[in-house]
């Protein structure tokens, strides 16, 4: 892996929610609650294509 000295192209300047959270969070929480209701242990894999705020929100919910 190379040492990255210039991250000027990195476009996430903070961990705030973006406009996409208005539709992503309800869909994810609904799917996870459906799994919980079925008796299955809900699991989530965050691929890391953002600033981490959705993963942080879901982790905060347990």
Image (spheres, rainbow, N blue to C red):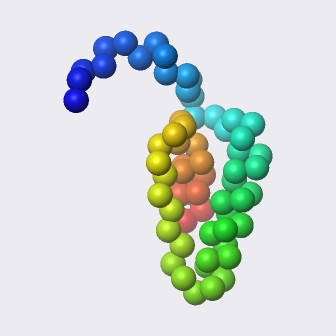
In the rendered view, tell whether residue 22 sits above or below residue 15: below
Asked where in the image residue 51 lies, by quadrant, the reply is: top right
Picture residue at 66% right of the left edge, 60% below the top: 28
Quadrant for the C terminus in the image: bottom right
Q: Position of residue 16 (x, y in %)?
A: 63, 34
Q: Position of residue 8 (x, y in %)?
A: 46, 13
Count the marks: 0
Quadrant for the N terminus in the image: top left
Q: Position of residue 12 (x, y in %)?
A: 55, 26
What is the residue that sits farthest to the bottom in this orientation?
39
Q: Position of residue 36 (x, y in %)?
A: 61, 79
Picture residue at 50% right of the left edge, 68% below the top: 43
Picture residue at 30% right of the left edge, 19% below the top: 4
In the rendered view, tell whether residue 18 sits above or below residue 23: above
Left or right relative to 28: residue 12: left
In the rendered view, tell whether residue 12 sits above or below residue 28: above
Picture residue at 37% right of the left edge, 12% below the top: 6
């Amino acid at each position: 892996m190379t040492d990255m000295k210039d991250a000027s192209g990195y476009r996430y300047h903070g961990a705030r929610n973006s406009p996409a959270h208005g539709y992503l969070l309800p869909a994810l929480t609904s799917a996870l609650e459906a799994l919980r209701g079925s008796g299955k242990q809900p699991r989530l894999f965050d691929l890391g294509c953002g600033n981490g705020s959705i993963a942080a929100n879901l982790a905060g919910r347990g």
